[in-house]
Amino acid sequence: MLRTDTPVTVYRKDYTPPAFAIDHVDLVLELDPQRTVVTSTLTFQRAPGATGDAPLVMVGEALELLGVTLDGQPFASAKEDAGTLTLTGLPAQGTLAITTACNPAANTTLSGLYVSNGNFFTQCEAEGFRRITYFLDRPDVMATYRVTLRADRAASPVLLSNGNLLSERALPDGRHEAVWEDPFRKPSYLFALVAGKLACVEERITSASGKEKLLQVWVEPQDLDKTRHAMDSLIHAIRWDERRFGLELDLDRFMIVAVSDFNMGAMENKGLNIFNTKYVLANAQTATDVDFANIESVVGHEYFHNWTGNRVTCRDWFQLSLKEGLTVFRDQEFSADMMGSESGRAVKRIEDVRVLRQVQFPEDAGPMAHPVRPDSYEEINNFYTVTVYEKGAEVVRMYQTLLGRDGFRKGMDLYFQRHDGQAVACDDFRAAMADANGRDLTQFGLWYSQAGTPVVSVKTAWDGAAGTLALTLTQRCPKVGIETRAGTPEKQPFHIPFAVGLIGADGADLPLHLEGERAGDATQRGTTRVLDFTQAEQTFRFTGLPRGDKAPLPSLLRDFSAPVIVDYEYSDAELTFLLAHDSDAFNRWEAGQRLATRALLKLVGEVQAGRELKLDPALVAAFRAVLTDGSLSPAFREQALMLPAEAYLAERMGVADPAAIHRARLSMREGLASALQREWLAAYEANATPGPYSPDADAMARRALRNLALGYLADSGDAAMQALADTHYQQADNMTDRAAALSALVNSFAPGREHALADFYQRFEQDALVIDKWFSLQGMQRGDVGPHAGKRTIDTVRALMAHPAFNLRNPNRARSLIFSFCSGNPAQFHAEDGSGYEFWADQVLALDAINPQVAARLARVMDRWQKYALPLRDRMRAALERVAASQTLSRDVREIVGKSLAA
Ligand code: TRP
Ligand code: ZN
């Protein structure tokens, strides 16, 4: 195995095209759980530029080589060594047949071919195909595939692969066979097969150009009643891509398959998407509104990859954001459009930005910081990050902000016109955007090559006599992560689309006129202007504003037009005014978050100084105003009344103090709960959703606000309110309400707590995804507060590890307990005695022996160890060192702990 060798760094600058092309792959798989035999017959061709004697070097992992033939004759000069198969003396073209065996049942990595619940599945991105057969396993080698699957008919009645089904037949010895053909050239990472006992729902639709398409969702038979929403989401996604981008489904048949053992969310294999059950299975009883929304977005995401990722793919893995950033942007826009209203769109944007700031900003400031297009990696699986995905999506969104929706669409059209069927680079996408719009986007390229979150500082100067407001913007982005190594060039200013509006004393937007702008210029319309902020410091003058003493109030970075931090000293009064009046819904929300963050950080200081905690009456008033403003949508109110997360607050401190943050935030929740009890109750009553459960945007928003209110009410500690949570639990007719009530009961240590936990388990014992919620809720539960002081969540978590339903091998289950505690419960995880860190190290090591990809994700929890106060920081380093000292670490975990300790 590769486990103990020294890490090798792969560099983007070392890219060279492959020496051979593989035009066609014919795979025959004799499926058997313990020993699957694979014969791969390749039609190869020496690349035009390659030297005549260059060998063909293929990679393989955990394979047993059984034989190689060239043009039907045994081929002697094939050398197998340390995961490579080197073939020398090959002709300019020919046919190679390689026979290997692998053991799917023993494959706990969930990469390559593996068995889950007795069924066969594959996962080939990024480098899993090499665990199925020796191959040029890199995305710029594109071939057509014909796949023959043979298996025991009783154990595996269903046999699926990419593309179209050509034939099926029975074989001797109770076996059978299916032959599939994918007419589209694809890289090996998009290959897939599924075999086993599965059932499907199907639907036929007619595509925009009038062709009939067969859509199927495959699951284990007992889950058929949970497929409706996934199928609806798929149909919506297909229609949306036709409408918004003119992109049609190219295959006659499109399949989604659900599997319960899966490392990530889902995978876009051509015509055969494979999904984590979490992102397929849902009905009112078992899935929350958030689950329904996630399913819609992941189904959309994988479907959209069919064009952005599959028809046009990546030249090498450094270009990963070419497909991921673009496809996340597309799924975000899809979900936003599905909300069906402007305010719904804004709420979707708020949710996306919250994730970006809570998870991506810390990544961009820590030891794993990397550009959207990384320059190097040790293990590519570690670069499926929030930077590549979510910041990558922000980069794509900025094109749309700069070019407009029509301009963006022109760029997309040109991109497909130029690159359909090719493996290309991020620069090709940027070139298509620039060329289709006649724009110079050279400087914009820095978003791909420079890491870190830029800070934009804003200064205003008001000339009341002239009616002119000067806005001076400065940007800085110090080196982070790998950029701090000696020899990296100085960073250059980014091209930032900076959207601003100006608000008058009556709260209305003012008409905008920029100095130097031609009258009648099309860009002059509207009350939001996107400034092209391209220099280290730049001043923009707005003229023709109403004269007088009082300057207009700037609304900065509207709709979060760029992934930056805005530094501007608003007063509390100004923020309250923006919260009440900004026409930009995102900035209305942002103003509330700034107010709450400011108040919370002040409270943290009070906790640290040992002073009594008092809630600012102005903050209570601001919250009351939002809570009772019937003109605001329930969805927006829910977003605005949610306090900033503990992890977000930790990032905002110079030295993070999780215990003080938790105390401060809890005290604010309790304070708001008591001070506004009447209003919370009124919101609770007003937002009931009578009638049968429906996952539509309006009902979802009402449930969200109602359950937020319930959570606050339970936190007031009032017995009557805890009884209300208990009733809410008992009367729930859907999982959204039931899970929210359970969480309120558990975290407020209400009397009904233990009973509800036991009831929940009993009701859903047979449903793995619901039991995941049961574990997760307990991993995230509070401890050590108020009358329950001394109760440590770690003790509950350790006890739950021994629960018969716990299973480290199933990633969803491991995440539900371990990850929820280590990353979803900062105050308990960072217990001063270091118990959380010891637990973390134990679990990283245990998981690494089973599934390095999952272990490496858990390892990332320690990224920000240097930010924590003593003694936490020392204890975190000690835990990291303990893991690093292991002699058997995977390359995955080694890269993470290595970079953490080196920072
Ligand atoms: N390409 C997939 C997506 O974003 C995710 C993915 C990458 C993945 N590597 C994986 C999924 C490994 C499962 C396992 O949609
Ligand atoms: Zn993706």
Image: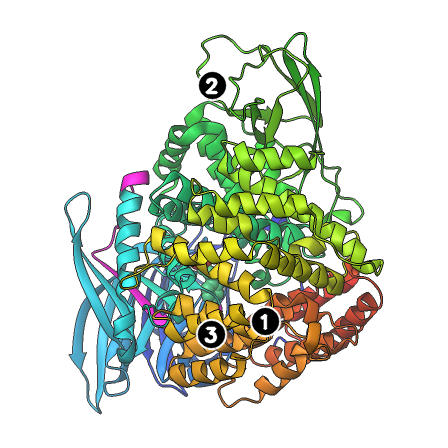
Asked which secondary structure carries label 3, the reply is: helix
The first of marks 1 and 3 along the sequence is 3
Residue 155 % position (x, y): 28, 87
Tell which of 460 and 244 is nearer to you: 460
Residue 645 visible in rendering: yes
Q: In the image, residue 66 lies at what x, y percent?
A: 43, 82
Vertical placement of residue 88 versus 846, above or below: above
Q: What stretch is highlighted in magenta?
A: 243-263
Location of ligand 2 given as a quarter of the image:
bottom left
Question: Which mark lies nearer to you, 3 or 2?
Answer: 3
Does dot 1 land on a helix, a strand or a loop? loop
Of the two numbered discs 3 and 2 on the same chain, state the one appearing first in sequence.
2
Question: Can you say whether 637 is above or below 445 in the image?
Answer: below
Q: Which amino acid does label 2 sit on?
A: Thr
Mark 1 and ligand 1: say if the CB distance to the nearest ligand atom is below 8 Å: no
Question: Which one is earlier in the sequence, the residue at label 2 or at label 1?
Answer: 2
At label 1, the amino acid type is Ser
Q: In which quarter of the image is residue 669?
A: bottom right
Give the percent coordinates (x, y) of residue 849.
60, 81
Q: According to the image, label 2 marks what residue?
A: 523
